[in-house]
Every structure is written in C-alpha cells, then in structure tokens.
Amino acid sequence: MFDILPFDRKETPLTNRQGSRRVAFFVTCLVDNLFPSIGQAAVTLLEQQHVSVHVPPGLTCCGQMAFNAGYRDEAYVVAGRTIEVLRGQGDVVLPSGSCSAMIRHLYPELFRGTPHQAAAEELINRTYELTEYLVDVLGVTDVGAHFAGRMTFHDACHGLRFLGLKQQGRILLNQVSGAELVPLTSCEECCGFGGMFAIKQSSLSEAMLARKLTTIATTQADLVVTGDASCMMQIAGGLSRINSPTRVRHIAEVLANMVEARN
C-alpha cells in the first residue's frame, strides 16, 4: 500500500473577517478540463450568498476513476493527497454528486483501519454537493434565476442513491422565473454513462441512453437539467446525434443565468 503523499498546510479559519462562511471549491476533473463554465457558475452562486470561495492550491482529483477501475493503491494515494490539501479549508463544496459521493461514501472504505481514517472522517463531515449546500446548509431556495422555456430534471445516480439528493435541485429550479419545470418519467433511471461502465459495457450504455432520450422527447422540454457534468455530457451527445433541439446544461449554469432561451 502506498503512503499518503506529504503535504504540509497551515490551518485556515472557517470564516473570513466579515464573518461569512469559507468554502473550498472542489473543481472536479470534468469541470476543470471540459466544462469550466460550470465551475464559474457554481462560484458565482456561492458568492451571491456571501460565501468566501477559494480553490486550494494543489487540489486535483478525488481518486474516483482509479477506485472504480480497481486501482485501490493508486486511489489511496490520490485521495490521501486530497485529504491533506483540504485540511483546515472550511466547508468543501463540489458541483458533482458523483465526486461528493466518492468522498463521503467511499473514502471510509478506502481509509478504514489506516492511520488516516480520522482525517478522512473529518473531511466527510464538511463535504457537500452544490445544491445540497445551497438548500440544506445555507437555506436558499431562490437565487434569482430566470429562464424562458420548459425544463426537465434528470437525477444523477450517485447524487440520488449515495447522497439522497432528490428535492434540492427541484426546489431551486421551481423558483426559476419564467420557466416551466415538467416531470421526466425516467428521471431516476441511469443515463448509461457510469464512468468506466460506458467504456467496458458500451452496448448496454447505448441502450440505456436510448431509453433516456425517448422519455426526454416526451417532455418536449427546451432544456434538460442535471447536477453532474458526466450525465450532461452523455445525454448531450445522444441528443446531438439525433438532431434534437433539446439542450442539456448543469444546474449551476441555469441558476447562475448562464443559459439563454432559444429565440
């Protein structure tokens, strides 16, 4: 088993001098490399609530890809560095139920019985997915968003099943001015991405996506909203290949007014 990489960091206060909450924003791999607008939107939303947001230097991956692929030793090293980088950094907020679930539900397994178990458990207790943080921690339901059109919501698997995120996104979207939020019949069904699953089981992934696209079509929605960039990428690719006019965006972008209605 690899040792956690050494990373010395001074403790920092949980609030700034004005007394607002201090949040370490965890920029996930997909957001960092493919969808930076999601990160920008999430930071905007947090700062609108008078939260002091920072990205700790040296923060990279949560280790989920290695863990899911069976590379436990490598995941241990990456996750261990994440724990050290986030030590003393205040509340940790991620625009992803998937990465949040890695920290909150898989770190306990990864570090159980190791010298770093206590540090992992301490991080778990201050880690939140974005909509969870807005609604359950900050008590926010209306962020002043607006969208002229019909929206539907897809529940990302990890957020729904590991974190119990069902109402938070809908509570926020129901307050979007000018928008009509319509139900999606298959909202709790997987879109077929699942990280390594889409690669190793491509035929099953494609069949699952086809089911999802069929139910999306019945909503006649202008916009599919979801809380994970991975689901957004999977569904958007499918809609593009069938020339659907429906778009897919991350909930942070919708709430931060970064999505324009179609003319």
Image: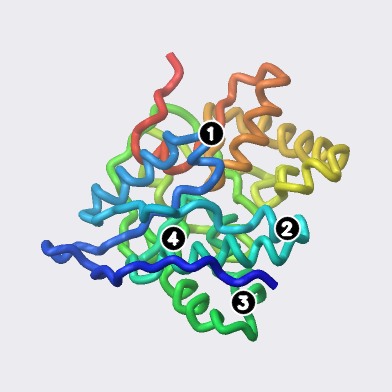
Q: CA distance from mark 4 to mark 1?
A: 23 Å
- Could you tell me how far apart the alpha carbons at marks 2 and 4 are, in whole angstroms? 24 Å
Q: How many labels were placed on the picture? A: 4
Hey, what amino acid is under mark 3? Phe
Percent of width and height locating residue 226: 55, 43
Considering the image in quadrants, where does the N terminus appear? bottom right
Three-letter amino acid code at the position of disc 2? Asn
Q: Nearer the viewer, mark 3 or mark 2?
A: 3
The image's mark for residue 34 is 1
Residue under numbered circle 3: 111
Marked residue nearer the N-terminal end (4 or 1): 1
| Kind of residue at badge 4 | Glu
Which mark lies nearer to you, 4 or 3? 3
Label 1 – label 2 distance at C-alpha? 21 Å
Image side of residue 153 versus residue 44, left or right: right
Look at mark 2 in the image and give the residue it sits on: 68
Q: Pointers 4 and 1 in contact (CB under 8 A)?
A: no
Q: Is residue 185 above or below residue 126?
A: above
Mark with earlier residue (3, 2): 2
Q: Secondary structure at mark 2?
A: helix
Mark 2 or mark 1, which is nearer the start of the sequence? 1
Between the C-alphas of marks 1 and 3, the distance is: 30 Å
Residue type for callout 1: Leu
Determine whether the residue tagged by mark 4 lies in a helix, strand or loop.
helix
Numbered disc in front, either 4 or 1: 1
